[in-house]
Image (spheres, rainbow, N blue to C red):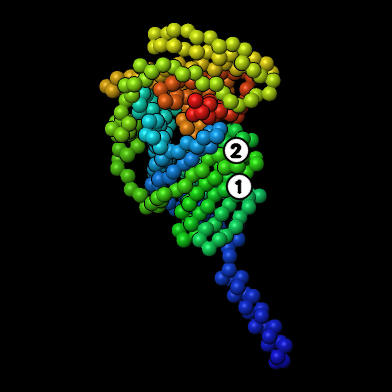
């Protein structure tokens, strides 16, 4: 065997070993993630979520429970602990709990399968699997994907960067971005337990409402507060505020904003009724869960309603799309924060 031939074989062997021990492909990692998500029977996670609302940033603590991809408990608490909501899924349906108002809403919904969810592991894995054009890179400690999102308002938040720990494939962070790649939602996972166990009543609605109220009691301040009117900062082309009407109801002041033009809509604001601690109310609603980031509301084809810091909001329109209603609602939070 000639020296040249020997060197060629050595080079070929080295190349083979390098490729065998080198970086994994996007498809390899996506397959590993899918297998991991399917194998996990229950997990508990905590995360810190930051929302960019206008020029302000708002922080939330998120606690996530998942049992066999059938039972869910997602609790969202404001950094100042003055606002808390919970999404709960059990055998009876999907609930949105608002402990400070002592109210819950029941949905017949496909949540969380019908949209991207930045804080649910299996949803992130699904986003990767469904986006064949997703980009991928590997660092010393992480796998990083950039994928399209599956939000109803995906034109507002079309992209996300998802980072996983190479060691155990746990989620590290998620950045949900606008078309200019500006991060508007930033989720940083602080803990992930892939081997979590749950008690029989872990997903019971009444037990979770009671537990949440121990941390954030039923509000006693809303009744005495003056209603501070908020205006959407989102600009809908060809639409402007036509009139603002105020009326007095049994529960206080109600303000109705009427917008007219190419895409007209009506926006109603009034103080939320706070039920006594012993009189919890569960209302069955038609529509889908609308995750606004700062609050969880109810979406139908022609309306969007939500509660935030003791105020009920209801947006109604025959002209706005669901994504445009979401855009208006999210800009309401920005406007309220800037006051």
The residue tagged 2 is 157
Q: Is residue 32 left or right of residue 201?
A: right
Q: Is residue 277 left or right of residue 229?
A: left
User: Going 51% across and 31% down the picture, which residue do you hit?
Assistant: 292
Residue 202 location (% of width, % of height): 32, 39
Badge 1 element: strand
The residue tagged 1 is 147
Checking the image for residue 168, the label placed there is: none
Badge 2 element: loop
Foreground: 208 or 70? 208
Residue 199 in view? yes
Residue 83 location (% of width, % of height): 39, 30
Residue 298 in view? no
Q: Is residue 29 left or right of residue 239?
A: left
Q: Which of the marked residues, 1 or 2, is nearer the chain's N terminus? A: 1
Say above or below: 130 vs 136: above
Mark 2 nearby-residue class (10 Å; few <14, some 14–19, many ≥20) = many
């Amino acid at each position: 065997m000639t020296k040249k031939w020997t060197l060629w074989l050595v080079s070929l062997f080295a190349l083979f070993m390098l490729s065998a021990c080198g970086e994994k492909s996007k498809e390899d990692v996506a397959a590993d993630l899918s297998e991991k998500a399917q194998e996990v029977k229950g997990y508990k996670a905590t995360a810190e979520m930051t929302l960019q609302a206008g020029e302000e940033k708002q922080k939330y603590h998120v606690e996530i429970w998942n049992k066999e991809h059938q039972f869910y408990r997602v609790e969202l608490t404001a950094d100042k602990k003055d606002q808390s909501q919970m999404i709960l899924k059990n055998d009876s349906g999907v609930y949105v709990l608002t402990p400070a108002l002592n109210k819950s809403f029941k949905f017949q919904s496909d949540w969380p399968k019908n949209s991207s969810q930045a804080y649910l592991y299996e949803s992130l894995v699904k986003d990767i699997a469904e986006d064949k054009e997703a980009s991928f890179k590997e660092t010393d400690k992480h796998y990083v994907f950039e994928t399209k999102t599956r939000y109803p308002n995906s034109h507002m938040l079309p992209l996300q960067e998802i980072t996983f720990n190479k060691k155990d494939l746990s989620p590290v962070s998620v950045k949900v971005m606008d078309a200019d790649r500006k991060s508007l939602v930033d989720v940083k996972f602080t803990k992930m337990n892939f081997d979590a166990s749950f008690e029989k009543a872990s997903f019971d609605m009444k037990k979770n409402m009671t537990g949440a109220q121990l941390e954030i009691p039923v509000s006693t301040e809303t009744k005495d507060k003056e209603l501070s009117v908020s205006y959407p900062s989102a600009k809908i082309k060809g639409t402007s505020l036509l009139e603002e009407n105020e009326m007095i109801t049994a529960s206080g002041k109600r303000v109705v904003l009427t917008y007219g033009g190419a895409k007209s809509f009506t926006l109603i604001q009034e103080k939320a009724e706070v039920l006594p601690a012993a009189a919890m109310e569960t209302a069955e609603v038609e529509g889908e869960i609308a995750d606004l980031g700062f609050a969880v509301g109810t979406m139908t084809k022609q309306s969007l309603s939500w509660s935030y810091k003791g105020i009920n909001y209801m947006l109604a329109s025959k002209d706005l799309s669901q994504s445009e209603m979401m855009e208006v609602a999210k800009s309401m939070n920005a406007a309220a924060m800037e006051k």
